[in-house]
Image (tube, rainbow, N blue to C red):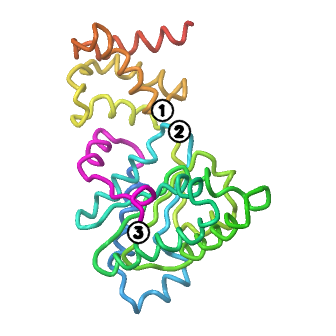
Amino acid sequence: MDEKYLFMLDKEEMKTRVKALTGFEKERDEIKTLSKIIFDMDIENIEYMKFLNINGNVLLFGKPGTGKTSICYDCMLENTSASYYQLNMAALVSEKLGKTAQKINEVFEELLNESKKYPVYLLIEEIEAFLPNRRESKDLEDMKRALTIFMHYLDKINPNLMVMCTTNHLESLDSAIVRRFTYKIEITNNSIEDMEHFLTNEENPFHIFFNDELVNHKIAEKIIEKKMTFSDVKNMMKRLLLRDKGKKIENVNANSLYEMIMEEENK
């Protein structure tokens, strides 16, 4: 298989990405439970799974920067014996016009063969970029065939294979595709408590500079009020770090972050 389209995810990079991840504990636990069901499924139980429409397909949707990919990584890392893959279907579509359906078929057949040996996760990000609503799409016949092939594999209950997809625009997806995901979860802005935990979590290396509970609470309130995402907050922290050419790590602290948020608000 061409590695430009299907490549293995680095476990250590995934672990780094999920550090200080907070919020959506209930949803993450449910996805992890679903993984165990799929990976421990007995052949005799498949008919029961079919009746309940339970498969290994998970769709996370919500605006950019809310942590969809990090949540996927966190759930995938629950099974340390699994293989983790990502499919760059956008590149596959753009470079293999006329052969998209064939390539999708090859990808899934390869993963299904591998899943006979050990658990496999497949991540597809920003799925809306290449799975538009068929009624509104002006794509070539090849894309329509590709959609049909993709849905064919989503329809199957594949023991030992989890397909995790993310999208920023659920409304752009064909409803026929959305129906084929067992678990659909909207990733929205977190609570004040989640944001406070993000700042003080020991997995956040800057947590030592966020030891003022009152300021942390004020920061979290403003973040929620302004509907900022974790990515927005990290970007502000980056800007603080870059002051003095990044020589002072302590620039990233509670008071400085709150001041920056207020400066942005007063512009």
- Mark 3 belongs to which amino acid? Leu
Residue 113 part of the magenta segment: no
- Mark 1 belongs to which amino acid? Thr
Instruction: Please give the range of residues in magenta.
Output: 1-24
Disc 2 versus disc 3: distance between alpha carbons? 25 Å
Secondary structure under tag 3 reads: helix
Disc 1 versus disc 2: distance between alpha carbons? 8 Å
Query: In percent of the image, x 48 and y 55: which residue is there?
Result: 88
Indicate the position of residue 108 as horizontal and vertical percent values: 47, 72
Q: Which mark is residue 229?
A: 1
The answer to whether mark 1 and mark 2 are in CB contact below 8 A is yes
- Mark 2 belongs to which amino acid? Pro
Point out the image quarter for the C terminus: top right
The answer to whether mark 2 and mark 3 are in CB contact below 8 A is no
Label 1, residues with CA under 10 Å away: few <14, some 14-19, many ≥20: many
Label 2, residues with CA under 10 Å away: few <14, some 14-19, many ≥20: some
